[in-house]
Amino acid sequence: MKLPRLIVAAPSSGSGKTTVAAVLLAAWRARGRVVQPFKVGPDYIDPTHLGRAAGRTPRNLDGWFLDRPELLEVFRRGALGAAGALVEGVMGLFDGRDALGHEGSTAQVARWLDAPVVLVVDARAMAGSIAALVRGFRDHDPRLRLAGVVANRVGSARHAEILAEALEPVGVPLLGYLPRLPELELPERHLGLVLAGERSLEPEAWARAAGTLDVEALWRLAQVAPALELPPHALPEGRQPLRARIAVARDAAFSFYYPEALELLEQLGAELVPFSPLADEGLPEDASAVWIGGGYPELYARELAANRGALEALRRFPGPVYAECGGLMYLSEALETPDGRYTMVGLVPGAARMQNRPTLGYRHVEALGDGPLARRGWRAKGHAFHYSTRPVVEPAAWRQVGGAEREGYLDGRVHASYTHLYFPAAPELARRFVAAAAAHAGV
């Protein structure tokens, strides 16, 4: 596989990776290049900005979720029809699941893809020190090729000249910069950046920002990436006959889904039918299962509670129901926010309560019983990132592998949990979910 590709990394979170990646994708798109965006790590939000800029559905690449063959397969499938690929990193270049960044880091993905790395440096309070910083990142792992720098939040053209001069002895060129402008800052809230559908950089801002990037030099750098030798297909190929209709909650309150996970369900014979717990009075006709993903139910608690038709439809639905994070909160008896207590579906005992501190991190879990996704003892990988808490009620869905922590709820038909699963890491879970939906439909 010969495909131009580039990794956009940074020394730390908040450096401006997403902004730089979005501007570069938009600039390449304006030049007629079809470039596929990817995001390292478990992230639903940043990819929305990359997808808006590129005009293509982004994919996630995570070296803890997947072994190299499976990750390369996700990369290959996502890049079909593209002339190049841009991969935005996660946190700092060497930050991952472990202290050394061996698993789940941008550096791991860069090694597996054999792709050059561009480092985005927040230079707003920096001049000559950029040389020491970049030299350290260049030399930290000789298996990586740190091939260029983009400076972010630069105060002036002269400031950019100083940064370029400082980097000359290091031998890593400055390939452009983004100025310190309010319109280039993406707003944030408690789970990270806002979604692109709510606010993203405007095309005019992209165009202006691209004027201070060496867009063509960055494209030439991407072309330096050597051909990738791809292993045999590690994920299911082809598409099975239609077996079931799965209703998937998709609106402003519920939008956290991995595209590659949705595609896997479709490959296995599911028709995915969107519905809105905010606006729809009921579930799609002939739905044989329901999936309610994560999102921001806390921001729409009043509206969700007011849509009694949707609440009652879910209470009466007799088929398999899978919910994760925001979906778990919605299926609880109530959702307590600083604005009040709101009645929710009630399929899961107990109330969810918002708190000020997040719970986050990777999750390696083992099923505690048989349900629509797993049999007792099956293991899965995912992540958690939430600002709510709720009591553990029995029967719990998962136990942390290697620990005693239990979470979620499983009654044989309803599986609800804070863990966002990554189906491509355990296709048997997706296969079982489609089979449970098909069984309910009588197929």
Image: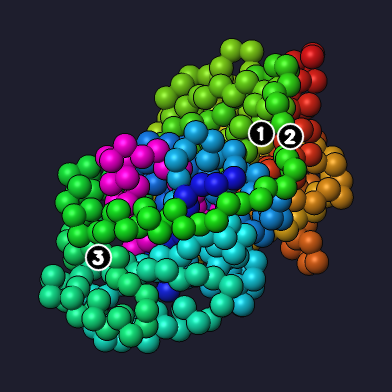
Disc with the residue nearer the chain's start (3 vs 1): 3
Indicate the quadrant where residue 424 lies.
top right
Secondary structure found at label 2: loop
What residue appears at the point 78 percent right and 27 percent down from the top-left corner? 436
Q: Is residue 404 above or below residue 290?
A: below
Residue type pointed to by label 2: Pro
Amino acid type for the residue under numbered disc 1: Leu
Q: Is residue 255 left or right of residue 1?
A: left
Assign the C terminus to one quadrant of the image. Answer: top right
Whole-percent x, y for residue 226 in the image:
55, 56
Q: Earlier in the sequence, mark 2 or mark 3?
A: 3
| Element on which disc 1 rests | helix
Whole-Å distance between the Cαs marked 2 and 1? Answer: 8 Å
State the extent of the magenta-drawn residues as a range: 15-42
Q: Which residue is mark 3?
A: 177
Residue 186, quarter of the rendered image: bottom left
The reply, left or right, for residue 287 in relation to residue 304 is right
Neighbor class of circle 2 (other Cα within 10 Å; few <14, some 14-19, many 20+) is: few
Question: Badge 2 is on which residue?
Answer: 236
At 45% across and 71% down in the image, what residue appears? 146
Dot 3, how many residues are within 10 Å of its Cα: few (below 14), some (14-19), or many (20+)?
Answer: many
3 or 1: mark nearer the eye? 3
Q: Which residue is mark 1?
A: 264
Residue type, numbered disc 3: Tyr
